[in-house]
Image: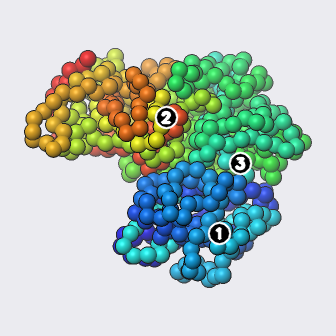
Amino acid sequence: MSDGAAGPAGTYPSTISVSNAAASITDLSISTNGLTHAFPDDVDLLLVGPGGQKMIIQSDAGGSTVALGMSYVLSDAGAGGLPDSAEIVAGTYRPTSHGGAVDTFAAPAPAGPYSEPAPIGSATFASVFNGTNPNGTWSLYVMDDANVDGGQVRNWCVRLGAPLKISEFRVRGPNGANDEYIEIHNDSPTPTLVSSPTSAGFAIAASNGVARCVITNGTLIPANGHFLCVNSAGYSLGSYPAGAGTIASGNATYTADIPDNAGIAIFNTSLPASFSLTTRIDAVGSTSEANTLYKEGTGCPALTPFSIDYAFHRDQCGKNGSITHFAACPDQGFARDRNNNALDFVFVDTNGTSAGAGQRLGAPGPQNLSASVSGTAKIVNATLDSCVQARALPNLFRDSTSTPALNSTFGQLNIRRTITNNTTVPLTRLRYRVDDISTFPAPTGVADLRPITSPNLSVTVDRPPGGSGTSSTTVFGATLEQPPSQPNGGGFNSSFNIPLAADLAPGASIDVNFRFGLQQTGEYKVDLVPEGLPVGGGYMNTLHLSGCTDATCTELIFRADTEL
C-alpha cells in the first residue's frame, strides 16, 4: 500500500493456488501475516474464492493505533470481531466490517455487491464458502481507502481445517532406522485445542495407514507452538533444549519403524478407515512415495538411507535452503505451506552430507509442547551501538585469528545486537534459530560460516547521544545448542541460546554476541529467527546481515575485545 495515496496494494491481487485438497470446504480461515500500517482503519481486504465467491473479510478495523508487523487469524471460531478503534493484537478474530460507507475495490477486483460480515452484515466464512470446492486460485485484494498513511500485508495463507502442519521430521538417524520423529506446528497466534468429534483425536500416520501417534482430544497446543511424536525405540535427540529448563522429549511415542522415504500425514481423526483427503490436515513424503495421500506435490527428494543426524525442516526463509541466494528472506521467519513438499522443506545434516536432497550443513531441532515459540514482531533487535554503522565496530567484529579447532580456520565473525522484549510479558526463555546462512558447501567467493558458542565479552561502546565519551558494556555470548553434536559447527536450523540470568521484563534489553567461525572467506549472509517463552518473535523481525568477510570490501575494523 503506497505511503500517502489511497488505492490498491502493489500486488493486486495477491493469489494462492490450492490443489489436491478435499473437494468440499468444511472449515476455512485466513492467516494475515505482517500487517504494518500507520492507520490500520484504512485497510480493507476482499477475499475471492476459486468459484467467484467474494467476501469482505476486514474493513475499517484497528483505528489509528500503528500496527507493526502484526499477525492474526480470521476465523468463524474467533471469540469476537476485530476491534473498531483499539489496537489489533495477535489473536484469532471473526471476519469484521466496521465501515459505514459501501466499500469499493478497484479493478481488476470483481464488482460488488460483496458479502459482508458483522457488524455491517451477517456473512461468515461458513455461509459464503462451506460446501464449495477450494481447489483453484484464491485472490486477496488489499485496498487503502484513505490518503496520507501507508503500509503492507507481508503475506497471507488460506487454511482448510485445523491450523496444524508438519514442520520437521526424519525417519532415520545415527541410532539407526528407529531414530525418528515428527514435529507438528500450530501455525496460529492462538492455542489450538485438539477436538475430533468422532474419534480419540488427530492421528499422525505413515503411508502404510498405521497411526504412529495420536494427539488426543483435549490437547492444547500453544500459540505458534509444537507437538512432538517420537519413536521411543531409537530417538536420540531427547536432550535437545526445549523450554525453560525442559528438553525435547516426545509428547507421544511409538515403536513401529517408518520406512525410509515413506510418507507421513496428520488427519483430523484417529480412525484409519477415515484417512482421506477430506480428513487430511497436512502431509509430507518423498518422490518415491506412491500414495499421494501422504505427500504434497511431487514430494521431497528421496534419500540414500544413511544413518546420519539429519532432518527435513520447513523453510522459514523462502529460498529453499539456497547457500548462494543473497537477497533478504522473502518469508521473514514465517514457515509457509505452499502445498508442495519440494518447495516447503529443506534437508540439513550435521556433516553436510550429499544424500540426495541437496547438500547443506545444518542440524535437527525437534520441538515439543514445552518448547519456545515464534510468531510475533515484538522481540526486536538493534545494533549494539546505534551511533555507528551496522557493519562497523562494535556492531560487527572480524577476528582474524586462525583457530581450526573451533571451525575458525580463517578467523571469526562476531555480530553484536541489543535484543529488546517489546511484548507485555516477561520472557523466561529466548533463543535464535538459523533460517538462512552461507555455509558448507559454499562455492569459491562465498563465505563458509559456522555458528559456534561465544563467551561473554566486555565491549567498548559510544552510545547515543554519541561523542560524549565511551563506556564498557557486557555483551553476553550466545550458545550453540546441542545435541545433536555439531563438530563442524552449526548451520541451517541450528539454534543459539540467549543466556537470561533472570526473566527479561517487558521493555528490558540484553546485549548479545553471535559468533561464527570462518572456514572460507567471501560474501556472507545470515538470518536468525527469535523464539521465546511464553511468547516468541519471528515474523518481520528476524536478525539479518550480509556483507563480505574481507576488509577490502566492507568497513570492518580489526581490534581485540576482552573475553570475560
Q: CA distance from mark 3 to mark 1?
A: 26 Å
Q: Which residue appears at 50% of the width and 72% of the height?
A: 143
Q: Which residue is mark 2?
A: 532
Q: Going 76% across and 63% down the picture, which residue do you hit?
A: 126
Determine the CA span between mark 2 and mark 1.
36 Å
What x and y, as percent, mark residue 189? Answer: 58, 47
User: What number is the disc on residue 445?
Assistant: none
| Disc 2 residue type (three-letter) | Gly
Measured from the top left, where is residue 425 in percent x and y?
A: 48, 37
Between 203 and 124, the one lying in front of the other is 124
Could you classify mark 2 by the number of other residues whose Cα lies within 10 Å: few (under 14), some (14-19), or many (20 or more)? many
Name the secondary structure under disc 3: loop
Q: Tell me which amino acid carries mark 1.
A: Pro
Whether residue 219 is visible here, answered yes or no, is: yes
Judged from the image, the secondary structure of the residue bearing numbered disc 1 is loop
The residue tagged 1 is 119
**Mark 1 nearby-residue class (10 Å; few <14, some 14–19, many ≥20):** some
Image-based side of 480 in relation to 372, left or right? left
**Residue at (26, 17) in percent of width and height:** 564
Could you classify mark 3 by the number of other residues whose Cα lies within 10 Å: few (under 14), some (14-19), or many (20 or more)?
many
Numbered disc in front, either 2 or 1: 1
The residues tagged by marks 3 and 2 sit, at their Cα atoms, a distance apart of 23 Å
Look at discs 3 and 2 and give the one toward the viewer.
2
Which mark sits nearer the N-terminus, 3 or 1? Answer: 1
Of circles 3 and 1, the one toward us is 1
Residue shown at 85% from the left, 44% from the top: 197
- In what quadrant of the picture does the N terminus appear? bottom left
Given the current orientation, which residue lies at the most extreme right position? 273
Residue 425 vs 332, above or below: the answer is above
Give SS at disc 2.
strand
Pick the front one: 238 or 319: 238
* Residue located beneath label 3 in the image: 162
